[in-house]
Image (cartoon, rainbow, N blue to C red):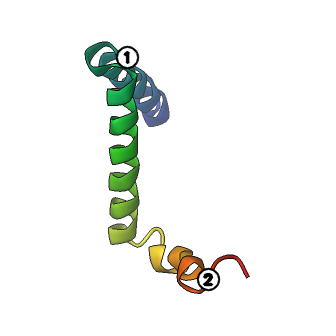
Amino acid sequence: MMSNKTFLGALLGVVIAVALLQWGLSGLLLIVVLAAIGGLAGAQLEGRIDLNKGLEGFRNGGRG
């Protein structure tokens, strides 16, 4: 039986292929950007990541 990661990888491949065929490269890039934003928002809401810690560097003037 397939593991969840195998199924997820296959499903992701199908979604990418359909997006490329339907909307071209610009549509695919838009889908990837929006999916990344949604993933970050979901991880923040679940408590898996803390975006405030990541953004502190930008608020305090960079890397230093």
Q: Is residue 17 above or below residue 32?
A: above
Q: From the viewer's side, name the closer residue of 11 and 19.
A: 19
Q: Position of residue 49 (x, y in %)?
A: 48, 69
Q: Residue at x 41, y 32 (%)?
A: 8
Judging by the rendered image, the residue that carries numbered circle 2 is 61
Whether pointer 2 and pointer 1 mark residues with C-beta atoms closer than 8 Å, the reply is no
Residue 7 numbered tag: none
Q: Amino acid at mark 2?
A: Gly
Judging by the rendered image, the residue that carries numbered circle 1 is 17
- The C terminus - image quarter: bottom right
Lower position in the chain sequence, tag 2 or tag 1: 1
For residue 43, side relative to residue 53 (left or right): left
Q: Position of residue 19 (x, y in %)?
A: 31, 22
Q: Quadrant of residue 25?
A: top left
Instruction: Tell me the element at label 1.
Output: helix
Q: Residue at x 32, y 53 (%)?
A: 38
Residue closest to the far front: 61
Q: From the viewer's side, name the closer residue of 5 and 46.
A: 46
Q: Is residue 21 above or below residue 42?
A: above
